[in-house]
Amino acid sequence: MRFTKMQGLGNDYIYLDCTKERPENAHELARRISDRHFGVGSDGLICVCPSRSADFRMEMYNADGTQGEMCGNGIRCMGKYVYDRGMTNKTDLTIETPGGVRTLRLQVGKGQVVSATVDMGAPVLEPGRIPVVARGSRFIGKQLHVRGRSYEVTCVSMGNPHAVVFVPEVERLNLAEIGPAFERHAIFPHRVNTEFVQVEGRSSLRMRVWERGSGETLACGTGACASVVAGSLTGRSERTATVRLRGGDLDVRWDQEDDHVYMTGPAVTVFEGEWPEKM
């Protein structure tokens, strides 16, 4: 089974061409192939599938085999995957995800995609749709008790659920300790991705992320978008900002006219190989 490993700011995924055939058990394959000691090593598996409502459909699985609704870094790399392989000649693409159809604009250099801008759609703020178990029409700047401490949390869905926590200094955090406690907190029925964000300026945010099903990753595109939305809603940042992650920078703009969030960042092919199994 041929595969391609790709990364966006170090957030890496294994890609399979499933337009004609797909794995029988993608959940189990994701666990095996993502293992960094006994597999290829990645934050998860992405299947490139046909779609009836868009140019392609993305099926994304976390490293623990659970299926995710959306992945910002993953969808940029998927755009590069289909363009670089001649599966499309479009530079404006639509990709179906469980979180909705997303539009990509590919930036091409020397015949290959180097970066992409993704229309991530409008942020979802209603607790029941994120989902988060809470009263009221929004969960913005509310206190949440985790491991004996109180944190100010803003919840946003960018096709998948996010809890954004602003902290004085992200590098001092022990994410391996507090990340799982946020991820599996009782108020998040589908678990949650948690962004810990340090405000460096009105247009600059530094972020670390604990992704549900994968742990700490070097970057998270949907999380960067959620962080800019949360920063704007709580008065900490502008609606346009650079989000600085351990794997690099993402440019995020929450447009005031259409309410959509636009994310721009790189997409890189790491290597190709063959996994010793059939589809």
Image (cartoon, rainbow, N blue to C red):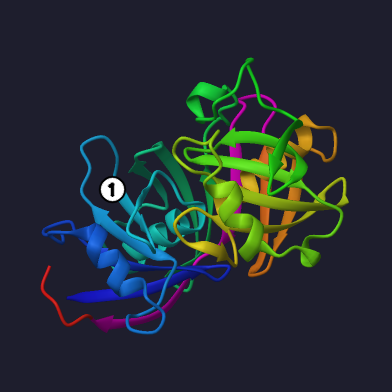
The one of 240 and 245 positioned closer to us in this rendering: 245
Where is residue 189 drawn, in percent x and y? 46, 35
Where is residue 7 drawn, in percent x and y? 48, 70
Question: For the point 54% across and 48% down, which residue is it?
Answer: 183
Q: Is residue 159 magenta?
A: no
Question: For the point 56% across and 30% down, which residue is it?
Answer: 122
Callout 1 secondary element: strand
Q: Residue furthest front?
A: 148
Q: Is the magenta stretch mostly helix, strand or loop?
A: strand
**Residue 178 vertical position relative to residue 227 in the rendered view, above or below:** below
Apparent side of residue 123 relative to residue 50 in the rendered image (left or right): right
Apparent side of residue 96 relative to residue 8 in the rendered image (left or right): left
Indicate the quadrant where residue 96 lies: top left
The one of 271 and 158 positioned closer to us in this rendering: 158
The one of 123 and 143 positioned closer to us in this rendering: 143
Pointer 1 residue? 56
Q: Tell me which amino acid carries mark 1.
A: Phe
Indicate the quadrant where residue 111 lies: bottom left
Indicate the quadrant where residue 13 lies: bottom left
The one of 73 and 209 positioned closer to us in this rendering: 209
For the record, the magenta segment spans 255-274
Q: In which quarter of the image is the C terminus?
A: bottom left
Apparent side of residue 88 relative to residue 193 in the rendered image (left or right): left
Question: For the point 48% across and 43% down, which residue is it?
Answer: 191
